[in-house]
Amino acid sequence: MTAQNPNLAELDRRLAEKQISGIWRIPPGARPGDPKTKVQPYLWKWADVYDGLLQARDQIDIERGTAERRTLRLVNPGVPESEMTSHTMLFAFQLIQPGEVAPPHRHTMAAIRFILQGKGGYTNVGGEKMVMEDGDLILTPQWAWHEHAHEGAEPMIWLDGLDVPFVQSLQVISFEPYPEKRMAVQNNPYDSSAYGMGRPVTREEQKPAAPLHYRWRDIYPALKRLADGEPHPYEGYALEYVNPLTGGPSLPTLSCWLQLLKPGQRTRSHRHTSTVLYHAFRGSGTTVINGQPFHWEKGDTFVVPLWHWHEHASRSASEEAILFSMNDAPVLKPFGLYREQGAGESHLGL
Ligand code: 1HN
């Protein structure tokens, strides 16, 4: 704000020369009563993503040093210059062809993979070979070496979720290619979560610090059991993928959920200071975000920006809807910045 008083304007100018600024220069609008975000509610259609992946399949070869991943990012129209999905998180879709290897590397960003289609691909994280199946969630903790490879017959597609813009905002991005062409697969007979809550007894300490692989075949029956009970007013039926060692979120910066809406089910509206990226894994529904309806079907992806009222409704009379989601609540809660507010009754304008 430019000062009206010429003496004050002169003071501001002299201070600015010394890299000093009076707090009176902050415009009143910059101190909103409510959190404000540039991130906009938005929905990406599966047909557009899928078509883009198929075209990229024909034009991009996965190569070390150039295109290390055949990955499409979802760009939020409110933060276009960042090419990120929100101010804290990135959702991207990756396609790998039979016989290809996405070369090994590591970075200070944490990543998750949620598997969408194909068979025979695997991710190697820190030597642990995890074969990908539809609906599986696989974690790549920060600074863990990882590569993807495909021993199957048809293209594999998965959803990548990362904390890139958050790590970027802290200016602590580091990236390192693996010193060799391929990562070795650790010579242990199991992957860390093949036996649910059990851990095979081995002669040596071969186990990783925490399980990295959450299987559809385990989580889906668990979600169905949850849906035998009372629904959560704002979430329907939702499971958070927890780190069993800490009881905390999937990763230090990201929390992943799997959510079920029964046919015709609708939730009440609420808002919170975390941002959520949703991917519709099954079924169809409508999410109303600050009064604007977003209709989603299997494969669509949408963002609920922070402090935006939102409620979900299933749009099928016979089929359940399943939403996979990732949120940034873990980077808010430790600092007392997580807030949540529920509305009274549903005001879903369907
Ligand atoms: C990355 O390393 C992968 O390893 C996928 O598959 C997506 C997006 C931004 C930065 C790094 C991967 C990524 C990424």
Image (cartoon, helix red, strand yellow):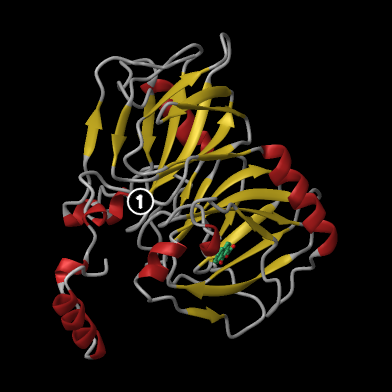
Location of residue 167 in the rendering, given as x and y in whole percent from the top left corner? 39, 68
- The residue sitting at 53% across, 40% down in the picture is 42
User: Which residue is more in the foreground, 218 or 336?
Assistant: 336
Apparent side of residue 11 relative to residue 223 in the rendered image (left or right):
left
The image quadrant where one finds ligand 1 is bottom right
Location of residue 243 in the rendering, given as x and y in whole percent from the top left corner? 33, 50
Apparent side of residue 46 relative to residue 137 in the rendered image (left or right):
right
Apparent side of residue 66 relative to residue 168 in the rendered image (left or right):
right
- The residue sitting at 48% across, 40% down in the picture is 41
The amino acid pointed to by label 1 is Asp
User: From where the camera sits, is residue 244 visible?
Assistant: no
* In the rendered image, the vertical position of residue 222 relative to residue 145, given as above or below: above
Apparent side of residue 342 relative to residue 294 in the rendered image (left or right):
left
* In the rendered image, the vertical position of residue 9 relative to residue 113, given as above or below: below
Please name the residue that numbered disc 1 is placed on: 328
User: Which residue is more in the foreground, 17 or 59?
Assistant: 17
Q: Is the residue marked 1 within 8 Å of ligand 1, measured from its CB? A: no
Identify the secondary structure beneath mark 1.
loop
- The residue sitting at 37% across, 69% down in the picture is 169
